[in-house]
Image (spheres, rainbow, N blue to C red):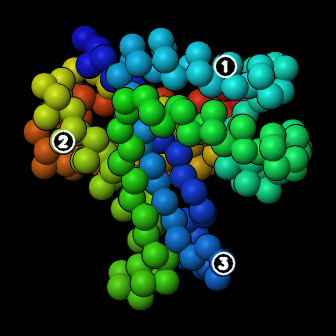
Amino acid sequence: MSSGYVVYVDESGDHSLTSINADFPVFVLAFCVFRIDVYVDRVVPLMQRIKFDFFNHDMIVFHEREIRKSLPPFDVLLRSDVRQRFMSRIDSVFDERFGVIATAIRKLEFKERVGADISPYHVAFEYGLERVFLQLQQRGVARQETVLVFESRGKREDRELEDEFDRIMATTKMRGMPESFRFTIASKQTNS
């Protein structure tokens, strides 16, 4: 039985501890928790309308870096009036009711504290899953299926991520968590 929720998971920054970018020495993993009805009836139509209004089609994929730097196809945002309207419309999406659970890791401190053998991604992943599960419990829908959607990062990385998910589900002390989640990977080009 469905919980009535869906969770989209995405990262910002890279989780490597071998080459840490001094300009962005953090790794962030965000879990966006949507009621399915809010997502389908409100969020998706808002995003579709933004895509058509600014790009005349809906096959565009929003990536933060391209938007921030006004890289194609977001070069339309080089005009300040267009950028202001676009950002205002994006802000309107955040008026909708959904939750964000984010784990931010300062990679230098993390590496000093636990060493380079432990992945910041895996730590953020487990912590985030536990927090999502606690939210589902509070809403009375734990032990009902909630799909977790991750963006594909390549065959090897996808396999490693699914293995880590399986490890977390097999070792968690949180009763009910394993039967609450279904792991799914979607292509970066999936337009949803």
Residue drawn 59% across the image and 21% down it: 46
> Circle 1 sits in a helix, a strand or a loop, which is it?
helix
Most extreme residue toward the front, as rendered? Answer: 81
> Circle 3 sits in a helix, a strand or a loop, which is it?
loop
For label 2, the residue is 134
Tag 3: residue type?
Asp
Mark 3 or mark 1, whichever is nearer to me = 1
Disc 3 residue crowd, few under 14, some 14–19, many 20+, Cα 10 Å? few
> Circle 2 sits in a helix, a strand or a loop, which is it?
helix
For label 3, the residue is 23
- Name the N-terminal-most of marks 2 and 1: 1
- In the rendered image, residue 130, in percent from the top left (x then y), is placed at 24, 47
Disc 2 residue crowd, few under 14, some 14–19, many 20+, Cα 10 Å? some
Q: Is residue 167 left or right of residue 156?
A: left
Marks 3/1: CA distance?
33 Å
Tag 1: residue type?
Gln
Q: Is residue 133 left or right of residue 53?
A: left
- In the rendered image, residue 149, in percent from the top left (x then y), is placed at 48, 32
For residue 60, which quarter of the picture?
A: top right
Q: Compared to 39, does 19 lie above or below? A: below
Residue drawn 81% across the image and 19% down it: 57
For residue 19, which quarter of the picture?
A: bottom right
For label 1, the residue is 48
Tag 2: residue type?
Leu
Instruction: Say which quadrant the C terminus sits in.
Output: top right
Instruction: Say which quadrant the N terminus sits in.
Output: top left
